[in-house]
């Protein structure tokens, strides 16, 4: 198992395959967070209230 993980890390480091996966994952998470913050800000400034208010 240790040898397999070492080989995979070398393959990712030399080919850049892991880098592309990380870039796509980071872009997805960042856009989801930005969308959520924007939706909350729009709702706040429009004065949308919850049922508790």
Image: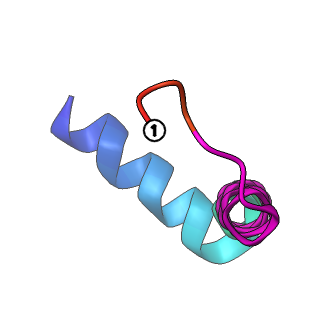
Q: Residue furthest front?
A: 53
Under circle 1, the secondary element is loop
The foreground one among 24 and 49 is: 49
The foreground one among 21 and 7 is: 21
In the picture, measured across the screen, residue 20 lies left or right of residue 52, that is right
Q: Residue 21 sits in which quadrant?
A: bottom right
In the picture, measured across the screen, residue 43 lies left or right of residue 11, that is right
Q: Is residue 5 magenta?
A: no
Q: Residue 32 placed where, x, y %? A: 73, 54
Residue positioned 48% across, 48% down in the render = 8
The main secondary structure of the magenta stretch is: helix
Q: Residue 11 placed where, x, y %? A: 59, 59
User: On the image, numbered disc 1 is attached to which residue?
Assistant: 53
Query: Local crowd at mark 1 within 10 Å, few (<14), some, or many (≥20)?
Result: few
In the picture, measured across the screen, residue 53 lies left or right of residue 24, that is left
The foreground one among 21 and 17 is: 21
Q: Is residue 43 above or below residue 45?
A: above
Q: Evaluate whether residue 43 shows in this view.
A: yes
Q: Residue 40 placed where, x, y %? A: 67, 58
Q: Residue 1 sits in which quadrant?
A: top left
Q: Residue 26 sits in which quadrant?
A: bottom right
| Colouring scheme applied when the structure was drawn | rainbow
Q: Is residue 39 magenta?
A: yes
Name the quarter where the C terminus is drawn.
top left
Q: Residue 19 placed where, x, y %? A: 68, 70
Q: Residue furthest left?
A: 2
Residue positioned 43% across, 50% down in the render = 7
Please report the bounds of the magenta region as a residue range: 24-49
Residue positioned 17% across, 40% down in the render = 2
Q: Evaluate whether residue 23 shows in this view.
A: no
């Amino acid at each position: 198992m240790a040898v397999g993980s070492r080989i995979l890390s070398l393959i990712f480091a030399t080919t850049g395959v892991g880098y592309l996966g990380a870039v796509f994952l980071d872009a997805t998470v960042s856009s989801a967070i930005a969308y959520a913050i924007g939706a909350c800000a729009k709702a706040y400034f429009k004065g949308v209230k919850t049922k508790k208010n």
